[in-house]
Image (cartoon, rainbow, N blue to C red):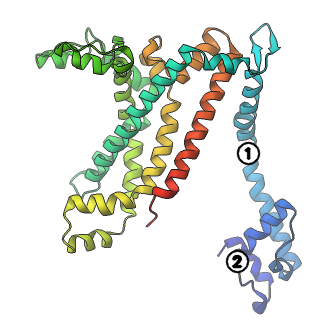
Amino acid sequence: MDPIAKRHEEGVDQDARPACQGWAQRARHALRHGLELPEEWHRLSPAARRRFLRESFQAYTFLLPALVIIGVFHVFAIFYAVYISLHDWSILKEAYIGLANYSKLLADPEFRQSLLVTLWYVIGTVPVGLALSLGVAVLLFRPLRGVGFYRTLFFLPYITSLVAAAAVWQWMYNPDYGVLNLALARLGLPAQQWLLEPRGVFGLALAPLGISLPEWAAGPSLALVSIIVMSIWSGLGFNVIVYLAGLGSIPRELQEAARVDGAGEWQVFRQVTVPLLSPTTFFLVIIATIRAFQAFNQIYVMSPNDPTTRTLTMFIFQTFYGSSRAGYGAAAAMALFVILLLLTIAQMRLGQEKVHYG
């Protein structure tokens, strides 16, 4: 029962206690929207009513600062960005041009290229990162010796400053003295340019065979793949912790019943564990997709000027601050907002059909 409702019922006769335990929530809803109060409200004593109103007012008072911050820095910012996107906006002038920025954006090859780079980044980080996280979580869920230490070890990259981590990875990728090329030299393999390589990884892989691919089929650049690897490493800890929580919520009886019926470990994992983890996976897919579309810090630190690593966020930043075209940058930001909104809605609808909640 609602604790507040339980206390307020002290002012009601024993025979007149509400039959429905959710009356307090319905009363708050009625007060917020000016609706008729539920029948249980009229059974309360005047003192209980005053106490209910006072505590409800206190609750909304505590929420008010957070609501103000969200309203100013999120809701207002969105509407202000829409306003700017409809203007030819710079430091010295502000002229209304309607949807001209949006029509220009759709015809801009640099915008389309940044959208393609973003899609490659999302494809590289979300499926691969979640699959790797699930595998690590399954291993760390077993009763291993020192498992707490390993869980902490995997979580450390997530709480490390992304800028500092990106700087370290940039040093590791250095073609002259980076540890990765030193390791390749020890193995007798040729050194790579890593963050300085604009050619696609598919084209690089097939080049020794004498196969040449057109630019559109060469895949993401090695520089972008290098950033993707760093991003997967950075976000692995969060995904693993969430998957561990999901694994802990699965009833062991279901897995034991499957084993009794003769199912092997792989069958138990594929037919029992994975379906019951679908709510967790669904949550992580949405979070990881949004995070991938909004990635900026590691790209800005590791490869700020390479067109093959310029995602939508980098395109917005360079348009807004580099060329001082605030209106055009705001239009690109709104395009990113619409893409994320539509993608999230599609994921939510698909999740309603595919997610199993036990």
Q: Is residue 53 above or below residue 100?
A: below
The residue singled out by tag 1 in the image is 67
Residue 79 coordinates in the image, percent (x, y): 75, 32
Quarter the C terminus occupies: bottom left
Q: Is residue 107 visible?
A: yes
Residue at the bottom extreme of this rendering: 15
Residue occupying image coordinates x 24% and y 61%: 267
Give the residue displayed 45% in from the left and 23% down from the top: 117
**Viewed as shown, does residue 88 lie left or right of 220?**
right
Q: Position of residue 329 (x, y in %)?
A: 65, 18
Determine crowd level at label 2: few under 14, some 14-19, many 20+ residues with C-alpha closer than 10 A: few
As displayed, is residue 231 above or below residue 22? Answer: above
Characterize the local packing of mark 1: few (<14), some (14-19) or many (20 or more) Cα atoms within 10 angstroms: few
The residue under the point 78% across, 64% down is 29
Q: In the structure shown, which secondary structural element does the residue marked by tag 1 occupy?
A: helix
Instruction: Tell me the tag on residue 6.
Output: 2
In this rendering, the label closer to the viewer, 2 or 1: 1
Q: Position of residue 6 (x, y in %)?
A: 70, 77
Dot 1 amino acid type? Leu
Mark 2 or mark 1: name the one nearer the start of the chain. Answer: 2
User: Can residue 179 be seen in this snapshot?
Assistant: no
The answer to whether the residue labelled 2 contacts the one labelled 1, judged by CB atoms less than 8 Å apart, is no
**Under tag 2, what secondary structure?**
helix
Question: Quadrant of residue 81 in the image?
Answer: top right
**Residue visible at 36% across and 18% down in the picture:** 221
Q: Which quarter of the picture shows residue 67?
A: top right
From mark 2 to mark 1, how far is it between C-alphas? 28 Å
Asked which quadrant contains residue 354, the reply is: bottom left
- The three-letter amino acid code for the residue at tag 2 is Lys
